[in-house]
Amino acid sequence: MAEERRGLQRYSVNEQIALEILSGERLRIQAFLKNYSAKGLCVFLDRALPVGSPVSLRTAEVLMLGEVVWCQRAGDGYEAGIELEHTLDIHELRSQIEDFSS
């Protein structure tokens, strides 16, 4: 049995998430968030993502920017690991923009 090497707690979820590849043809894809930690997340989707691609991920409350660090076949789709570089709370961001505009 493989030893778990992650130092951060991972949380399992099954939430639909919007993913956009920010290079090349800038594809928008619906994916499912499988699990996440403070530094990264795993998504399930119907196509492979190129390793090294910058991506944005969005839920109703959070906008995340990261990079695809791995992608592999999983059943009838693909799983991809995303290393997070920035996470923004959408409500907090809107509030800051409104304050700046005032």
Image: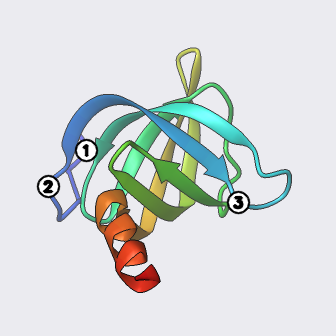
Q: Tell whether 5 sits left or right of 101.
A: left
Q: Tell whether 49 sits left or right of 102.
A: right
- Check residue 67 in the rendering and tell me which mark sits there, or answer none: none
Tag 3: amino acid: Leu
Place of residue 100 in the rendered image (x, y in percent of width and height, measured from the top left): 41, 84
Tag 2: amino acid: Gln
Of 89 and 84, which appears nearest the observer? 89
Q: Tell me which corner region of the image, top left, top right, bottom left or bottom right, holds residue 69.
A: bottom right
Disc number lying in front (3 or 1): 3
Q: Which residue is mark 2?
A: 9
Place of residue 81 in the rendered image (x, y in percent of width and height, measured from the top left): 47, 50
First of labels 3, 1 by sequence position = 1
- The residue positioned farthest toward the left in the image shown: 9
Q: Is residue 64 above or below residue 34?
A: below
Q: Quadrant of the N terminus?
A: top left
Q: Which residue is mark 3?
A: 22
Q: Is residue 77 above or below residue 44?
A: above
Place of residue 84 in the rendered image (x, y in percent of width and height, measured from the top left): 42, 65
